[in-house]
């Protein structure tokens, strides 16, 4: 396709949480996502709230991990649906391909 810049693929053999952290950092570094800060919950906490977990997508806020972060998953799904990122698994190795449209498209 015209106007697409594809970055090299990256090979990984990591756990799901490590893959999510890696994807988050790549998307943050590329400018496809921005840090989303949220206020820590106060007083009564929902059943899913875990004081031992921090979410990188929400700036390290306590209460959940990136693995359970619906906001992050939604943003990643949105990028996949738009064709800006793609995940390819080959023989147990993950390849993450990002395609960024040029400014004139």
Image (cartoon, helix red, strand yellow):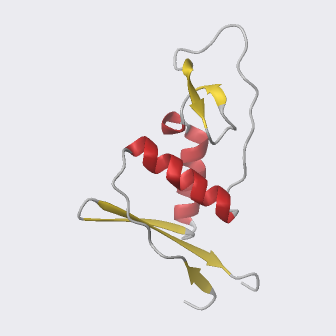
Residue at the far bottom: name it.
2
Q: Is residue 17 left or right of residue 102?
A: left
Q: Quadrant of residue 4?
A: bottom right
Residue under the point 59% across and 45% down: 72
Q: Is residue 31 left or right of residue 10?
A: right
Which quadrant, please, contains the C terminus? bottom right
Residue under the point 54% across and 20% down: 52
Residue nearest the viewer, comparing 82 with 19: 19
Which quadrant, please, contains the N terminus? bottom right
Residue at the far left: name it.
91
Residue under the point 54% across and 76% down: 7
Q: Is residue 90 left or right of residue 27?
A: left
**Whole-percent x, y for residue 3 in the image:** 64, 88
**Whole-percent x, y for residue 95 in the image:** 40, 66
Q: Is residue 49 above or below residue 68?
A: above
Q: Is residue 105 above or below residue 74?
A: below
**Whole-percent x, y for residue 42 in the image:** 73, 13
Residue under the point 53% across and 67% down: 85
Residue nearest the viewer, comparing 77 with 5: 5
Q: Is residue 12 above or below residue 65?
A: below
Q: Is residue 48 above or below residue 102?
A: above
Q: Quadrant of residue 93?
A: bottom left
**Whole-percent x, y for residue 90 in the image:** 28, 67
């Amino acid at each position: 396709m015209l106007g697409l810049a594809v970055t090299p693929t990256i090979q990984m053999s990591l756990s799901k949480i490590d893959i999510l952290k890696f994807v988050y950092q790549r998307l943050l570094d590329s400018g496809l996502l921005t840090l989303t800060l949220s206020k820590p919950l106060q007083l009564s906490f929902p059943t899913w709230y875990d004081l031992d977990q921090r979410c990188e997508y929400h700036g390290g806020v306590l209460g959940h991990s990136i693995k359970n972060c619906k906001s992050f998953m939604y943003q990643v799904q949105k990028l996949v649906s738009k064709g800006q990122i793609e995940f390819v698994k080959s023989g147990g190795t993950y390849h993450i391909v990002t395609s960024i449209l040029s400014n004139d498209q």
